[in-house]
């Protein structure tokens, strides 16, 4: 095997997780009442995969005929994807138990989607790029419509499937144009071909193809103007699915977008930077203004995620290792804040009405559940970017690179969007602490959920401490250099 595929050890994580998903499927099919067992085995498989990913090292290595690459950048982003997947499985256990909707297929679909995301992060060819996206997407289509007897869930799955199929078609058309005008689908070969074109520059067909590819990838990160599916899918899907959608696919898609822009098309930065600037500004502004009118907390989190994607894209615009480091630090902190917030959302339940999703139902939460209100406040202030919480540093690390690169107007827009966005985050805090108390929630009894919420809240508060943030920033810095040196 090593003779046929040299350096295959860098893909051991993906291979192991793929076989693990098949094993989980067999356990689920042939063993009755296996939901709990399948879920915890899935968490164990993800943990082993994380170890294999880290053990692969940070040296830039290729395998599968240069279709697959591993380096410090892929390792950092894969760790984030795997952490998000493991937390999503753990968070889903208590939710589905209370809903009486436990099915072993859920953790298996999460594992398969995670395999697709890992392939996306390591893609070094337009073909492996597409394979990773489709493996991820096919699993996510099913997850979005997982509650089959719910109209909202079915609608969410159908919308995501139809628009996802459209984006895949756009992406494939862009890939075909790039191949037709450049003559290769491999990232390294495309980079060499473009650098050899000299002053004549890339053919117009390749530029058009790149725009189509960017459009397809923008759908995956729900960047404006390809965001239209996000609020409806977030609201209609079950809350553990929404939590997974909000974090892991965005991390993987942003990693793929970063490699696609910097490695094969670094020579065309003048062409793609304008597109990325538009997506960033439009996403920040729409996310900030549209969330103000929302009354459903899951829809609010959908527009919040659109806005945060806009901020993350700022790092790519800078076009250097400092900007890439900002993207990576931003996604790490984004994962902490969003998972923490969704743990809180899933912890709010009424005996008869089920999970709470309306913002006004949080009225007076500080009087009935002061600890829960404190956790939500921490995550909300962090999402707003209030210092000295982690969210402030996330925005700091993407705004400083664009200022250093001379994009002062972009920095001003980012700060204004952050100020506007702070309104709807702080409004939730106001509802919890100053409005008349509503009916009490059922107390949270899940120890894993309590532990996750507590640890993430502490991490958000303690990120200002160099001993906590230092290793993350240093890892992101070295990982960003490996991608820029590709």
Image (cartoon, rainbow, N blue to C red):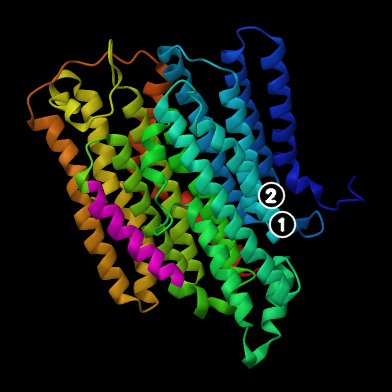
Judged left or right of residue 87, residue 444 is left
Q: From the viewer's perspective, is 53 left or right of 39?
A: right
CB within 8 Å, label 2 to label 1: yes
On the rendered image, what quadrant is the C terminus found in? bottom right
Residue under label 1: 127
Residue 296 spot, x, y in % from top left: 26, 35
Q: Nearer the viewer, residue 318 or 254?
A: 254
Would you say residue 326 sits in the magenta stretch?
no
For disc 1, the neighbor class at 10 Å (few under 14, some 14 to 19, many from 20) is: some
Residue position marked by numbered label 2 in the rendering: 131
Label 2: state its secondary structure: helix
In the rendering, at what x and y percent does residue 137 appear?
58, 43
The one nearer the camera, 295 or 114, is 295
Q: Which residues are magenta?
A: 275-291
In the image, farthest residue toward the top: 32
Counting from the top left corner in percent of width and height, residue 195 is at 67, 82
Query: Residue at the spot x=63%, y=68% of the render?
Result: 263
Count every numbered label the image shows and give the total. Answer: 2
From this view, report whether residue 356 is shown above or below residue 310. above
Helix, strand or loop status at disc 1: helix
Instruction: Name the image quarter holding residue 11.
Output: top right
Q: In this picture, is 476 found above or below 194?
A: above
The quarter of the displayed image where residue 318 is located: bottom left
Q: Residue at x 12, y 25 (%)?
A: 364
- The quarter of the picture where the N terminus appears is top right
Question: Main structural element of the magenta stretch: helix, strand or loop?
Answer: helix
């Amino acid at each position: 095997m090593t003779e046929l595929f040299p350096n295959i050890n860098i893909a051991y994580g993906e291979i192991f997780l793929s076989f693990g998903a098949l094993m989980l499927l067999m356990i689920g099919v042939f063993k009755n009442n296996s939901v709990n067992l399948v879920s915890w085995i899935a968490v164990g498989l993800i943990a082993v995969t994380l170890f294999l990913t880290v053990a692969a090292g940070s040296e830039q290595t290729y395998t599968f005929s240069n279709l697959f690459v591993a380096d410090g950048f892929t390792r950092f982003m894969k760790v984030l994807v795997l952490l998000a997947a493991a937390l999503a499985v753990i968070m889903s256990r208590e939710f589905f138990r209370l809903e009486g909707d436990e099915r072993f297929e859920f953790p298996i679909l999460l594992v398969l989607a995670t395999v697709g995301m890992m392939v996306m992060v390591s893609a070094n060819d337009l073909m492996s790029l597409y394979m990773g996206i489709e493996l991820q997407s096919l699993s996510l289509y099913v997850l979005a419509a997982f509650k089959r007897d719910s109209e909202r869930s079915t609608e969410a799955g159908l919308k995501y499937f139809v628009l996802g199929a459209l984006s895949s078609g756009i992406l494939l058309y862009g890939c075909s144009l790039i191949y037709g005008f450049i003559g290769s689908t491999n990232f390294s070969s495309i980079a060499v071909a473009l650098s050899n074109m000299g002053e004549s520059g890339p053919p117009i067909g390749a530029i058009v193809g790149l725009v189509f590819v960017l459009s397809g990838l923008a759908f995956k990160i729900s960047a404006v103007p390809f965001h239209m599916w996000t609020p409806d899918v977030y609201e209609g899907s079950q809350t553990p699915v929404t939590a997974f959608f909000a974090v892991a696919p965005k991390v993987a898609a942003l990693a793929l977008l970063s490699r696609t822009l910097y490695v094969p098309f670094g020579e065309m930065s003048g062409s793609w930077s304008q597109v990325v600037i538009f997506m960033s500004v439009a996403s920040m502004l729409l996310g900030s203004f549209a969330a103000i009118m929302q009354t459903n907390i899951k829809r609010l989190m959908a527009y919040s995620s659109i806005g945060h994607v806009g901020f993350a894209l700022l790092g790519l615009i800078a076009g250097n290792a400092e900007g890439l480091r900002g993207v990576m630090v931003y996604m790490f902190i984004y994962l902490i804040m969003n998972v923490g917030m969704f743990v809180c959302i899933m912890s709010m339940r009424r005996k008869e009405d089920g999970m709470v999703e309306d913002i006004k139902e949080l009225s007076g939460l500080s009087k009935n559940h002061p600890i829960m209100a404190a956790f939500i406040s921490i995550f909300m202030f962090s999402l707003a970017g209030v210092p000295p919480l982690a969210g402030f540093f996330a925005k700091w690390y993407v705004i400083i690179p664009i200022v250093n690169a001379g994009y002062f107007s972009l920095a001003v827009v980012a700060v204004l969007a952050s100020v506007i966005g702070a309104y709807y985050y702080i409004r939730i805090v106001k509802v919890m602490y100053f409005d008349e108390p509503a009916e009490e929630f059922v107390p949270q009894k899940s120890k894993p959920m309590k532990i996750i919420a507590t640890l993430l809240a502490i991490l958000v508060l303690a990120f200002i401490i160099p001993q906590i943030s230092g290793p993350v920033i240093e890892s992101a810095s070295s990982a960003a250099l490996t991608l820029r040196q590709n």
